[in-house]
């Protein structure tokens, strides 16, 4: 098992240095899954995706209060973190008071504000409009403070299987500077920086419905956020709104979401303007990389 894991992580490293490499996944008669850079009968091309999709629709949303031809539009933020929102209105008919420019605001944590008040131009006739609403977690103002992160786990030593700009999944804005660290399921995951827990997921098993699997997101005092992904089902031991310090237990490592093997995916993000992006970071101590078994370098 461990040999197969090392081999698979070796495939990761090879692919990050040679984008043209294709990885094939096959399952034998006994249900054993194998990965290789050489196609075999029945093997399928393996496509790895490690997206980070957090759905905040139930925690950040529009509220419409309608009375006597007046529509008051509010935004509610139920998160324990600020959010930046963008809102405009299209398809206007019989509407007065719609802003001429898109609304951009930052809502504090756990708050609600009125952002528009629309009235009927002709009384007794309906107001017709379509709101276009978007939002992003975090406040884009301010600057990130330099910080060297202690290792966010206990045990080891462990190794990086995919680092920054890895071509399997660390190439999009949200994950460009993420690191994947191979470790056995059940490894204790701890906070690498203090802050407030703003989002968690703990109920997913296996692939689940969220590509990130089970995770913990912590907001730091400079507006950056540390995210710990692919945690073991039922292991998250913090709640949203809880303050944590360096070394606080968060959960256990796992293999949930779009994960190809047991590992921790750790990334630091910030909102740069209606969009989260990953930012470079450093650990306080070196973390090595796995040998590239595909190329025979051990």
Image (tube, rainbow, N blue to C red):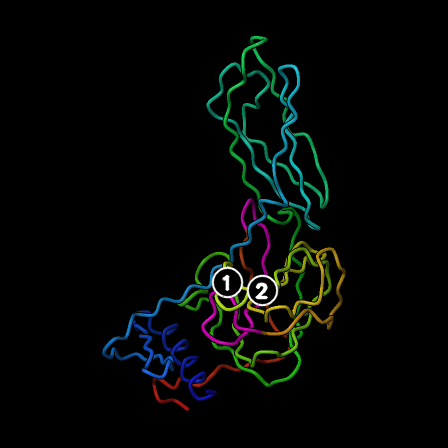
The residue singled out by tag 1 in the image is: 208
Q: Position of residue 15 (x, y in %)?
A: 36, 74
- Residue placed most toward the observer, 203 or 188: 203
Q: Position of residue 148 (x, y in %)?
A: 65, 70
Q: Quadrant of the C terminus?
A: bottom left
Determine the residue located farthest toward the bottom in the rendered image. Answer: 298
Q: Are marks 2 and 1 in contact (CB under 8 Å)?
A: yes
Q: Is residue 47 left or right of residue 39?
A: right
The nearer-to-camera label among 2 and 1 is 1
Q: CA distance from mark 2 to mark 1?
A: 9 Å
- Residue placed most toward the observer, 212 or 13: 212
Q: Quadrant of residue 253?
A: bottom right
Segment tinted magenta in the rendering: 254-275
Q: Position of residue 163 (x, y in %)?
A: 49, 72
Q: Is residue 220 left or right of residue 281?
A: right
Image point (71%, 46%), residue name: 109
């Amino acid at each position: 098992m461990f040999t197969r894991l090392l081999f698979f992580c070796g495939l990761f490293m090879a692919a990050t240095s040679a984008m043209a490499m294709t990885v094939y996944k096959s399952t034998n008669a006994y249900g054993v899954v194998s990965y290789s850079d050489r196609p075999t009968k029945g093997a399928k091309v393996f496509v790895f995706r490690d997206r980070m999709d957090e759905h905040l629709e139930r925690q950040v949303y529009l509220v419409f209060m309608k009375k006597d031809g007046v529509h008051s539009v509010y935004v509610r933020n139920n998160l324990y973190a600020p959010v930046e929102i963008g809102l405009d209105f299209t398809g206007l008919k019989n509407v007065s008071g719609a802003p001429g420019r898109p609304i951009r605001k930052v809502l504090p944590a756990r708050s609600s504000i009125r952002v528009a008040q629309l009235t009927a131009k002709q009384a007794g006739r309906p107001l017709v409009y379509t709101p276009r609403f978007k939002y992003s977690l975090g406040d884009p103002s301010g600057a990130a403070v330099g910080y060297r992160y202690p290792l966010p786990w206990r045990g080891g030593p462990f190794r990086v299987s995919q680092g920054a700009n890895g071509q399997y999944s660390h190439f999009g804005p949200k994950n460009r500077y993420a690191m994947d660290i191979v470790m056995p399921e059940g490894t204790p995951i701890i906070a690498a920086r203090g802050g407030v827990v703003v989002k968690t997921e703990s109920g997913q098993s296996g692939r689940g419905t969220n590509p990130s699997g089970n995770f913990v997101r912590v907001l730091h005092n400079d507006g950056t956020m540390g995210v710990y992904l692919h945690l073991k089902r039922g292991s998250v031991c913090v709640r949203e709104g809880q303050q944590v310090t360096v070394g606080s237990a968060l959960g256990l490592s796992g293999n949930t979401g779009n994960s190809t093997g047991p590992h921790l995916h750790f990334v630091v993000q910030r909102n740069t303007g209606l969009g989260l992006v990953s930012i470079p970071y450093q650990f306080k101590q070196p973390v090595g990389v796995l040998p590239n078994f595909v190329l025979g370098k051990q």
